[in-house]
Image (cartoon, coloured by chain):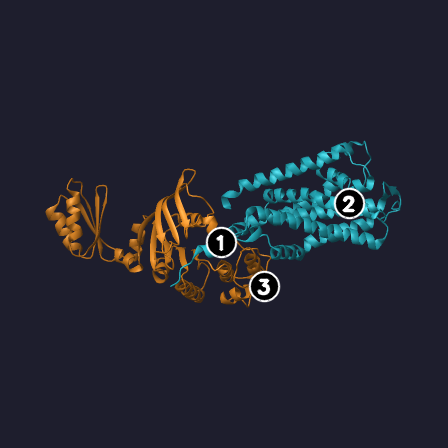
């Protein structure tokens, strides 16, 4: 049996006036996956999350959450989200906030149990205004878990948390994922994505630029990049040969520019200089941060 | 690993309308000391001072002057509470709470209905406070059915000010909205013949006839005075339409933030 994907985006674009926030994303998340949505600010992460939550409609393309329209999924308590900031009434107590939210769902989990699980029992009778940033974030998390969602969206979830809070938070997330909950979290911390996600989807300027496991994404970063100018009709044949060379991870053609990611950059360079009309050859070492920046096109 | 079957989940009845939410919202408003003092205790105190003057026993329609003042003060208190409940809508949007609510099954129409209901309940409390004070003081005199009719009409009229509250809340964001509405409603109440009766036919009266408190005040007191002019009804309907339109306009301008 092939279960319904937790999220299915196909050909999704979203424009705000002249600004193209999302320029065509196809993405499918399997149930129970923990996926990091990694990218710099302005990559379209929050816009995409808003589309999955049905807070806005795509300009083109379709969005399905567990096979349903996003708003249908939200109405059934199948999706919830933890937002980066705001979203709390300062004059309510922590317990009132949870009880208020619980009352809006058809079947919510017991308020006291959710409060206990989120570790906010001690502050349950305090006003939200007097809670620290980390405490407020745990409260938002408790609210998101009330409907026992199948899909949990987290937008920069650990902003404002200390190291200990971060660890507790992620162990809770991992435990839930083990029970079939799908988690998609937006982050711009590479380390967080690598450490806690089964899969990393790298987005930049409204497009998915890489999609794979943490180690696959890291492999993109190992070795070196050989860059050369190669304007030639035979380019396809050259790229085939290059792809077959030992230690070559990826071959990319961007206009007249050829990019080869390889562990054995010497072999690539030798081939390009002796067998092809390549010129302006450049060999650069890469680390994870470089890979991230080059893939996301944010190398400034 | 288990997978979720979406068909096992249901949507809430009544689009998320809930007594728990109403109770928490009510507690929240009553916890706000400014609301309690200015919208509930202050009108009662005004009634005790205006309604106890030497002419209190003079006849007005089916009752006396003290009853007339009591109905007026109930309207003033209810208008203030309803307006302050209305401003909360804008504050909640600014805080991102409305966005948070969009992550729940709560239907946006039900949200507005909940707020309107809340304004009515709070308005009823404010009217109730003034009426209880009136009863205890013992000076207001009118038949029971007139008494009840006046209270219910006053309550209906408070919706005008709930809409005004939403509108002003968007124009003057945050906690400052009530700083504008507090004195604003006091001035409108003077012009609306709520505090001190004006001389009919005077210049100020001619201007006052066009202000938002005038029509609703006439309507609220109609069962008592036995006199309801159509300009007063028109005044109330037009102002309600203006405030609802203004609130809807500002709210739609604000949707980008959801």
Residues at marks 2 and 1, CA–CA distance in whole angstroms: 43 Å
- Residue A287, image x and y in percent? 27, 57
Check disc 3: other Cα within 10 Å, few if <14, some if 14-19, many if 20+: some
Chain for disc number 1:
A
Q: Residue at x 18, y 54 (%)?
A: A265
| Image quarter hosting the N terminus of chain A | bottom left
Q: Colour of chain B?
A: cyan
Q: Nearer the viewer, residue A39 or A270?
A: A39
Q: Secondary structure at mark 1?
A: loop
* Residue A126 badge: 3
| Residue beneath disc 2 | B149
| Residue beneath disc 1 | A76
Q: Nearer the viewer, residue A140 or A29?
A: A29
Asked if both marks, 1 and 3, belong to the same chain, the answer given is yes
Image check: A272 left or right of A68?
left
Q: Secondary structure at mark 3?
A: loop
């Amino acid at each position: 049996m092939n279960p319904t994907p937790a999220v299915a985006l196909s050909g999704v674009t979203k424009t705000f006036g002249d600004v193209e926030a999302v320029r065509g994303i196809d993405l499918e998340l399997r149930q129970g996956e923990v996926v990091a949505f990694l990218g710099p600010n302005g990559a379209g992460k929050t816009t995409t999350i808003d589309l999955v939550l049905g807070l806005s409609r795509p300009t083109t393309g379709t969005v399905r959450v567990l096979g349903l329209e996003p708003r249908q999924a939200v109405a059934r308590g199948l999706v919830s989200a933890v937002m980066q900031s705001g979203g709390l009434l300062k004059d309510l107590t922590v317990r009132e906030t949870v009880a208020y939210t619980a009352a809006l769902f058809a079947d919510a989990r017991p308020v006291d149990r959710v409060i206990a699980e989120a570790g906010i029992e001690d502050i349950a009778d305090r006003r939200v205004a007097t809670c620290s940033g980390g405490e407020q974030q745990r409260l938002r998390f408790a609210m998101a878990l009330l409907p026992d969602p199948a899909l949990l969206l987290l937008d920069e979830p650990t902003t404002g948390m200390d190291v200990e809070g971060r660890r507790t938070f992620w162990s809770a997330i991992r435990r839930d994922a083990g029970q079939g909950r799908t988690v998609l979290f937006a982050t711009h911390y590479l380390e967080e994505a690598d450490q806690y996600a089964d899969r990393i989807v790298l987005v930049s300027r409204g497009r998915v630029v890489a999609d794979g496991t943490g180690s696959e994404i890291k492999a993109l970063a190992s070795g070196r990049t050989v860059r050369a100018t190669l304007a030639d009709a035979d380019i396809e044949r050259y790229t085939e040969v290059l792809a077959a060379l030992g230690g070559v991870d990826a071959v990319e053609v961007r206009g007249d520019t050829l990019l080869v990611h390889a562990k054995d950059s010497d072999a690539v360079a030798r081939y390009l200089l002796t067998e092809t009309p390549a010129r302006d050859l450049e060999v650069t070492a890469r680390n994870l941060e470089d890979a991230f920046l080059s893939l996301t096109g944010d190398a400034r | 690993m288990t997978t979720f079957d979406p068909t096992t989940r249901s949507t809430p009845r009544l689009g998320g309308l809930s007594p728990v939410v109403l109770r928490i919202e009510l507690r929240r408003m009553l916890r706000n000391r400014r609301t309690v003092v200015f919208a509930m205790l202050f009108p009662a105190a005004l009634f005790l001072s205006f309604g106890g003057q030497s002419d209190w026993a003079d006849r007005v329609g089916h009752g006396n002057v003290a009853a007339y003042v009591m109905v007026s003060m109930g309207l003033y208190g209810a208008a203030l509470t309803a307006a302050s409940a209305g401003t909360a809508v804008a504050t909640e949007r600014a805080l991102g709470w409305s966005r948070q609510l969009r992550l729940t099954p709560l239907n946006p129409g039900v949200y507005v209905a909940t707020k309107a209901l809340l304004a009515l309940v709070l308005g009823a409390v404010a009217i109730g406070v003034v009426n209880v004070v009136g009863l205890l003081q013992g000076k207001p005199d009118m038949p029971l059915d007139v008494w009840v009719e006046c209270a219910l009409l006053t309550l209906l009229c408070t919706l005008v000010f709930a809409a005004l509250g939403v509108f002003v809340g968007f124009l003057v964001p945050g906690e400052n909205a009530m700083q504008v509405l507090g004195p604003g409603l006091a001035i409108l109440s003077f012009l609306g013949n709520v505090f001190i009766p004006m001389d009919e036919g005077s210049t100020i009266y001619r201007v006052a006839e066009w202000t938002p408190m005038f029509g609703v005040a006439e309507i609220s007191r109609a069962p008592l005075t036995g006199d309801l002019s159509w300009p007063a009804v028109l005044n109330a309907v037009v102002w309600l339409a203006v405030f609802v339109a203004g609130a809807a306009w500002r709210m739609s301008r604000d949707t980008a933030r959801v």
